[in-house]
Structures are given as C-alpha cells and as structure tokens.
Image (cartoon, rainbow, N blue to C red):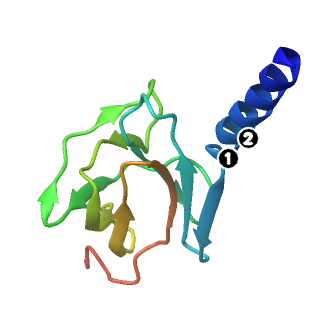
C-alpha cells in the first residue's frame, strides 16, 4: 500500500515539475517573444537578443523600458545580448540602434512566473543620417 502512495506522489510531482516547463511564443518578421515558465526559486528575467535583420548577426542596441534607458547586465562578451529584471506588469519596450529602424513592443506582459526571451531583428533605417 505504501508503495502505491509513493508511486502516486512521484507521478504527481513529475506532472507538476514538467508543467512548469511550458512555453508560449509570439512572432513576427522582426521580433520573436518566447515566454518560458521559470523555476519557482528564480526571479523573472527578460533576455533581449538584438540582431541585424539581413545578416542575422548580433547587433549593438539601446534598450528603453517605459521611457527610461536601461542599464543592463551583459551575458558574457556577446554584443547585442541583454538581461533585465522587470517588475510584473505591462511594459513598453523600445529597442534602438544608430542607423537602424527602431522596434517598439507595447504592453509586454511580465508575470512573476515567466522568464521572457526576446529576439529582435533590426532593419536598416530608411532615413538618411548624413547627406554630403
């Protein structure tokens, strides 16, 4: 009898643990947003990876959240990869770089149970920056 309870407890714990790993995604040609269920002991992170749209290589950028330019923690030495910790709620996010089109994400929903990975692909600006 005790073995059955142990087995039932094991199955329930396994179901709870594996359900924490579910994801959902939002995509367009310029941005991919992946919501990952975080482990309960970690703080929610927003990881932003910025790329050149044409070459798909990492690209330097500025990150603005709710009108404020953010200080960021870089992960390793990679250019264009940022990690922010945001409070739960809806945030307006702007990703900008000199010579590139600005990308805006309005009302990005951050919850306590999510970690978010954003892959942003910036296109060349159509605006002339310098005219001879």
Image position of 70 (left or right of 101): left
Quarter of the figure with residue 65:
bottom left
Please report the residue visible at 51 percent of the width from the left and 34 percent of the height from the top.
Answer: 39
Please report the residue visible at 49 percent of the width from the left and 71 percent of the height from the top.
Answer: 123
Q: Crowding near pointer 2: few (<14 within 10 Å), some, many (20+)?
A: few
Taking depth in this image into account, of 63 and 39 the one nearest to the observer is: 39
Q: Which residue is mark 1?
A: 19
Q: Crowding near pointer 1: few (<14 within 10 Å), some, many (20+)?
A: few
Furthest residue in direction top, as rendered: 2
Q: Position of residue 89 (x, y in %)?
A: 27, 63
Q: Which residue is mark 2?
A: 15
Taking depth in this image into account, of 70 and 89 the one nearest to the observer is: 89
Please report the residue visible at 28 percent of the width from the left and 68 percent of the height from the top.
Answer: 90
Q: Quadrant of the C terminus?
A: bottom left
Q: Quadrant of the N terminus?
A: top right
Q: Is residue 112 above or below residue 8?
A: below
Q: Is residue 47 above or below residue 8?
A: below
Q: Position of residue 69 (x, y in %)?
A: 16, 54
Q: CA distance from mark 1 to mark 2?
A: 6 Å
Instruction: Describe the element under mark 2 as helix, strand or loop.
Output: helix
Q: Position of residue 81 (x, y in %)?
A: 44, 41
């Amino acid at each position: 009898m005790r073995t059955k309870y142990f087995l039932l407890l094991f199955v329930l714990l396994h179901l709870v643990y594996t359900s924490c790993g579910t994801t959902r995604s939002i995509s367009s040609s310029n941005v991919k947003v992946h919501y990952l269920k975080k482990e309960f002991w970690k703080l929610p992170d927003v990881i932003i990876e910025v790329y050149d749209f044409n070459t798909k290589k990492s690209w330097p950028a500025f990150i603005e959240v709710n009108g404020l330019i953010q200080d960021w923690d870089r992960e390793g030495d990679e250019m264009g990869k940022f990690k922010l910790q945001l409070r739960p709620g809806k945030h307006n996010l702007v990703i900008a770089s000199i010579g590139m089109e600005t990308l805006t994400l309005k009302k990005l929903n951050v919850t306590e149970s999510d970690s978010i990975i954003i892959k942003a692909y910036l296109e060349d600006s159509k605006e002339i920056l310098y005219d001879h």
